[in-house]
C-alpha cells in the first residue's frame, strides 16, 4: 500500500461514429388544459388535455433552497458553470419539470425529435408547425427539425475507477481483487427490499470486489494511498447485483458493520488553496439527497468523486448507449470533470440523484472534447437504469425532515387520545413511526402522505411515557423527536365472581349504598338464556329499575340479599316457569309480595308482552331477531336511553307476523329500525315492516360493526362521555349492563374478547368519550381491552 492503490485503468476502444440520444426524461408537476391543435400531417386533433406545462423559475424564488447548499458547492458552481446557487436550484427544478413536459408530449402522440434545456428554458424539436404550437402552449420553445446530433468523443473511453464511522456518497472505498487493490467511489446509500443497508456504485467496480469493502478516510481528493486511510470495513459486495454491459453499470455493497452510519448525503470536498471541491471531504457540508430524477440536455449537474472531488458541468446528452471497450452502458453524458477513481460516484442535479459515474474520455478535464458518462438512476422508456435494474429490490436513502408535533410535551391523553402533527414535503411513501419508552421497534406506524398524521395511544398502559417519533419515507428515517405524555386511565370494570354476581355489581353501580332506600322495580330473568332479558332491559331502564339474574330453579342467596337491599316497589319476573320456576317466584314473593310474571308461549310473545307492559306508546321501535343475542343486546342499551322498545321477531321469515304488526300499530310508532343485516333480518321482513312505518336498517359486516352502528345512530349527535363495552361472544354480563347503559344514556357496544375494533375506537373518539366501562371480568374482556388496545 505504501506505493499507492493501483487504479483500474483499462483502455477502451475509440468510437468515432455519431451517437444519437434515444429517449427523454421524467419528474412531476400539474397539468394544464391546452386547446386541441390539428397536426399538419394528421386528420385527428392532438389530445392536449394531459400535457404538462413548464412553470416560471426565477432564481429569486430559490433563495431558501440555495442557502441550504454548502458554500463551497456554490463556489464550485460559480467556477465550473458561472451560475449562482439560486440559479442551480431553479435550473434543477426546471430540468425535472422539463422531463414531465417531454414525456406528456410523447404521451399525446407527438414525436419528440430531441429536447434540451438552457437555463430554465426548454426547447423541444418536433416535425411540424402544428406540433410547435402545442409545444409552445406547454411553455417551451418549439423547433421544427432534428437537433444537432450528439457526437461521441474521439478519445477512447475509460472506466473512471481507481471519516469517522459515517459513510457518505462520494466517499472513496477500497477492495482487493486477486493480488491487486483498487479504489472506487460510493454513489448513494440506500436499502434492500428488507431494509438492509447497501450503497450503490459502479458495476465494473463491485464485480471485482473479492475482499470485504473498506471505507477510505482521505484528507483530499486523489490523495496518495496509505494504510492510515483505511477506515472501517463496510461489508461484502453483492456480487450478484453487479451488472456491466447490456446497458448497465451498477452494483451494490452491503453495509453490515453496525458501527457505520450510512448518510443520505454526498460529500462536497471542501476547498483547498482557493480551488473549490478539492479539499477535505467534510470541509464543506455534505449535500443531502431528497430523491431521484431523470434529466435533460443542458441541465446543470455536479458530481462527487474520490479523485477529482466536487465538480460541476452541463448535461450534453441523455440515454446515450456508450460502447466502452465492448461493454454497452446507457449513459447521461456531461462535461463534468471525472477521472479514474471517481467510478461509482454520485451525479446530482440540485438535491436529486441523477446517476453514478461510469466512464470518461482519456485525457485531461481541460481537453475541449472531454466528456464523462454516468449510469442513470432512471431512464427513458425501455432504457437501462438503476430503477430498471433493481426495481423494488433497492431504494435510495433520502433526507427526511423530523416530524412537527402539535401535541404538547407533557400532555395528558386518554387511551383513545392521539399524538398529532405534520411532515414537510410528503411523498407517497411518507409515514411516521412511534417508539415507546426507548423500544427499538415502533408501537405504531401511520401514513403521512397528506402531510398530516395522527398516532393513537390505544393499547398504551396508563402512566407517564416517553414517545420518540421519526418521519420516514420508504426505509429512510428522520432524526427523532421525543416528547413525554401521560396516558390517563379512563376505563373501569364491573365484574363479579359469576354472571349472577356481575349483575349484582351492576346493580350496586346503579344504586350504591346511600342512594334512595327504595327503587321502582327489579326485573328478574334467567341467567341461563338470553331472549327474555333482551326486551326486559329497555323496560327496566324506562321504569327506573335494575335487572338481576337467577338460576331457573333456585334463587341465589346474594341475589336475594341485593333485592332486599334495593327494597323495590315491585318485582317483575320475566319468562314462564321453564325459565324462572314457580319455586323461585315464591322465594321472590316472600321478599316483595307486589310481584308479577310476564311470559308467553315463546320468546316472541314474551317480548311483545314486556313491551305492552312497559311502553304504553313509543315514537320508535327496534326490531331484531330473537334467534341470537348480539344485535338485540346492543339495541337494548340504546332503547333504554331513548325510551325505545326492543321487539324480537323470527328474522328469517319473509314478513312480519300479525301480532307484532298489531303491537307496532298500537304503540303508534312513526319509525322502525331493523337491527342486523339481511342474514339476520330478511329484506322481506324489512319491507313488510315498512308498510307499518318508515323503516331503516342498521347493520354491519359483523356483530361488532352492527353494534357500533347502532351506537352511532342512537348517540352520534349527543356525544355521550361514557361508553359501555361487553363481549360479543356471550350474553350474561351485558344483560344487566344494558339497563345501566340505558339509565345513564350511554351506548353499549359489543366487541371481541381481546381488542377493540378500529371503527369502535373511531366512534369513541367521535363521542369524546372520557369513561369506558367494561362489563365482565378479564376472561371475557382482557386487560388489553382495558388498555383500549385496537384490533
Image (tube, rainbow, N blue to C red):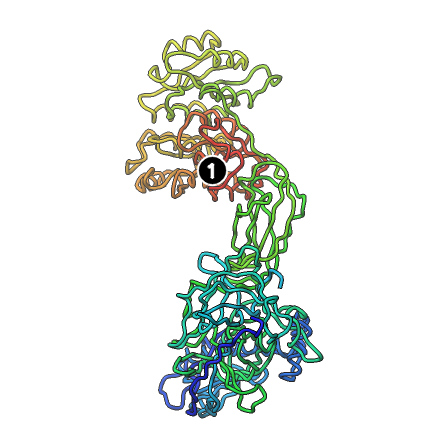
Residue in the foreground of this view, choosing between 543 and 282: 282
Q: Is residue 291 left or right of residue 586?
A: right
* Residue 14 at x, y percent in the picture: 43, 89
Q: Is residue 208 above or below residue 122?
A: above
**Residue drawn 46% across the image and 91% down it:** 149
For residue 615, say whether it is visible. no
**Residue drawn 66% across the image and 80% down it:** 84
| Residue at the limit of the structure toward the top, as seen here | 590
Q: Residues within 10 Å of mark 1 (few under 14, many from 20)?
A: many
Q: Is residue 512 above or below residue 474?
A: above
* Residue 675 at x, y percent in the picture: 39, 37
Quadrant in the rendering for residue 631: top left
* Residue 562 at x, y percent in the picture: 51, 14
Residue in the foreground of this view, choosing between 25 and 523: 25
Q: Is residue 548 above or below residue 758?
A: above
Q: Is residue 546 left or right of residue 697?
A: right
Q: Is residue 620 above or below residue 6?
A: above
Disc 1 target residue = 755
State the count of labels: 1
Amino acid at each position: 500500500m505504501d506505493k499507492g492503490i493501483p487504479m483500474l485503468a483499462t483502455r477502451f476502444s475509440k468510437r468515432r461514429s455519431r451517437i444519437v440520444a434515444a429517449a427523454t426524461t421524467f419528474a412531476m408537476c400539474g397539468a394544464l388544459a391546452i386547446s386541441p391543435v390539428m397536426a399538419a400531417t394528421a386528420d385527428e386533433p392532438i389530445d392536449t388535455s394531459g400535457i404538462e406545462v413548464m412553470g416560471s423559475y426565477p432564481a429569486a424564488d430559490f433563495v431558501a433552497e440555495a442557502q441550504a447548499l454548502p458554500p463551497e458547492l456554490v463556489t464550485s458552481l460559480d467556477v465550473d458553470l458561472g451560475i449562482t446557487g439560486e440559479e442551480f436550484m431553479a435550473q434543477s427544478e426546471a430540468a425535472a419539470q422539463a422531463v414531465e413536459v417531454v414525456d406528456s408530449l410523447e404521451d399525446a402522440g407527438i414525436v419528440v425529435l430531441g429536447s434540451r434545456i438552457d437555463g430554465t428554458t426548454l426547447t423541444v424539436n418536433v416535425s411540424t408547425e402544428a406540433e410547435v404550437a402545442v409545444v409552445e402552449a406547454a411553455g417551451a420553445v418549439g423547433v421544427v427539425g432534428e437537433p444537432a446530433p450528439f457526437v461521441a468523443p474521439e478519445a477512447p473511453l475509460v472506466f473512471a475507477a481507481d471519516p469517522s464511522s459515517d459513510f457518505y456518497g462520494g466517499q472513496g472505498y477500497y477492495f482487493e481483487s486477486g493480488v491487486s487493490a483498487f479504489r472506487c467511489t460510493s454513489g448513494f446509500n440506500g436499502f434492500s427490499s428488507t431494509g438492509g443497508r447497501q450503497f450503490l456504485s459502479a458495476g465494473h467496480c463491485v464485480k471485482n470486489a473479492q475482499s470485504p469493502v473498506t471505507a477510505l478516510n482521505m484528507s483530499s481528493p486523489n490523495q496518495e494511498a496509505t494504510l492510515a486511510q483505511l477506515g472501517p470495513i463496510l461489508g461484502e459486495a453483492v456480487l450478484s447485483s453487479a451488472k456491466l454491459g447490456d446497458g448497465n453499470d451498477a452494483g451494490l455493497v452491503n453495509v453490515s458493520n453496525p458501527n457505520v452510519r450510512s448518510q443520505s448525503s454526498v460529500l462536497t470536498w471542501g476547498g483547498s488553496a482557493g480551488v473549490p471541491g478539492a479539499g477535505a471531504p467534510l470541509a464543506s457540508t455534505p449535500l443531502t439527497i431528497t430523491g431521484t430524477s431523470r434529466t435533460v440536455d443542458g441541465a446543470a449537474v455536479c458530481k462527487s468523486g474520490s479523485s477529482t472531488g466536487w465538480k460541476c458541468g452541463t448535461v450534453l446528452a441523455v440515454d446515450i448507449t456508450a460502447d466502452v471497450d465492448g461493454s454497452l452502458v446507457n449513459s447521461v453524458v456531461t462535461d463534468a470533470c471525472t477521472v479514474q477513481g471517481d467510478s461509482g460516484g454520485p451525479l446530482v442535479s440540485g438535491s436529486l440523484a441523477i446517476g453514478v459515474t461510469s466512464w470518461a474520455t482519456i485525457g485531461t478535464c481541460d481537453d475541449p472534447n472531454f466528456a464523462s458518462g454516468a449510469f442513470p438512476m432512471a431512464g427513458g422508456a425501455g432504457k437501462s437504469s438503476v430503477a430498471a435494474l433493481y426495481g423494488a429490490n433497492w431504494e435510495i436513502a433520502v433526507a427526511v425532515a423530523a416530524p412537527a408535533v402539535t401535541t404538547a410535551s407533557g400532555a395528558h391523553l386518554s387511551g383513545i387520545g392521539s399524538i398529532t402533527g405534520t411532515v414537510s414535503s410528503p411523498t407517497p411513501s411518507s409515514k411516521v413511526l412511534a417508539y415507546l419508552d426507548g423500544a427499538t421497534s415502533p408501537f405504531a406506524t401511520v401514513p403521512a402522505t397528506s402531510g398530516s398524521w395522527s398516532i393513537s395511544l390505544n393499547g398504551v398502559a396508563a402512566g407517564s411515557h416517553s414517545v420518540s417519533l421519526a418521519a420516514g419515507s420508504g426505509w429512510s428515517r428522520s432524526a427523532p423527536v421525543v416528547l413525554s405524555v401521560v396516558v390517563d386511565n379512563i376505563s373501569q370494570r364491573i365484574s363479579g365472581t359469576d354472571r349472577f354476581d356481575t349483575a349484582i355489581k351492576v346493580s350496586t353501580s346503579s344504586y350504591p349504598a346511600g342512594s334512595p332506600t327504595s327503587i321502582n322495580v327489579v326485573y328478574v330473568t334467567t341467567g341461563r338464556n338470553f331472549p327474555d332479558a333482551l326486551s326486559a332491559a329497555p323496560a327496566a331502564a324506562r321504569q327506573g329499575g335494575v335487572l338481576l339474574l337467577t338460576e331457573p330453579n333456585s334463587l341465589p342467596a346474594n341475589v336475594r340479599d341485593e333485592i332486599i337491599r334495593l327494597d323495590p316497589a315491585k318485582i317483575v319476573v320475566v319468562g314462564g316457569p321453564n325459565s324462572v320456576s314457580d319455586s323461585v317466584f315464591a322465594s321472590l314473593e316472600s321478599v316483595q309480595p307486589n310481584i308479577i310474571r310476564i311470559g308467553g308461549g315463546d320468546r316472541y310473545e314474551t317480548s311483545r308482552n314486556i313491551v305492552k307492559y312497559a311502553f304504553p306508546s313509543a315514537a320508535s321501535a327496534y326490531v331484531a331477531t330473537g334467534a341470537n343475542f348480539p344485535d338485540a343486546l346492543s339495541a337494548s342499551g340504546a332503547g333504554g336511553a331513548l325510551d325505545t322498545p326492543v321487539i324480537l321477531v323470527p328474522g328469517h321469515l319473509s314478513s312480519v307476523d300479525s301480532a307484532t304488526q298489531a303491537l307496532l300499530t298500537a304503540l303508534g310508532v312513526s319509525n322502525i329500525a331493523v337491527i342486523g343485516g339481511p342474514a339476520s333480518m330478511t329484506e322481506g321482513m324489512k319491507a313488510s315492516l315498512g308498510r307499518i312505518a318508515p323503516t331503516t336498517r342498521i347493520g354491519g359486516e359483523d356483530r361488532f360493526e352492527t353494534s357500533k352502528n347502532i351506537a352511532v345512530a342512537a348517540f352520534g349527535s349527543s356525544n355521550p362521555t361514557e361508553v359501555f363495552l361487553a363481549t360479543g361472544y356471550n350474553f350474561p354480563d351485558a344483560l344487566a349492563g344494558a339497563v345501566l347503559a340505558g339509565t345513564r344514556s350511554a351506548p353499549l357496544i359489543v366487541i371481541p374478547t381481546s381488542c377493540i375494533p378500529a371503527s369502535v375506537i373511531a366512534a369513541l373518539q367521535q363521542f369524546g368519550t372520557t369513561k369506558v366501562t367494561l362489563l365482565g371480568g378479564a376472561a371475557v374482556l382482557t386487560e388489553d381491552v382495558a388498555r383500549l388496545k385496537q384490533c
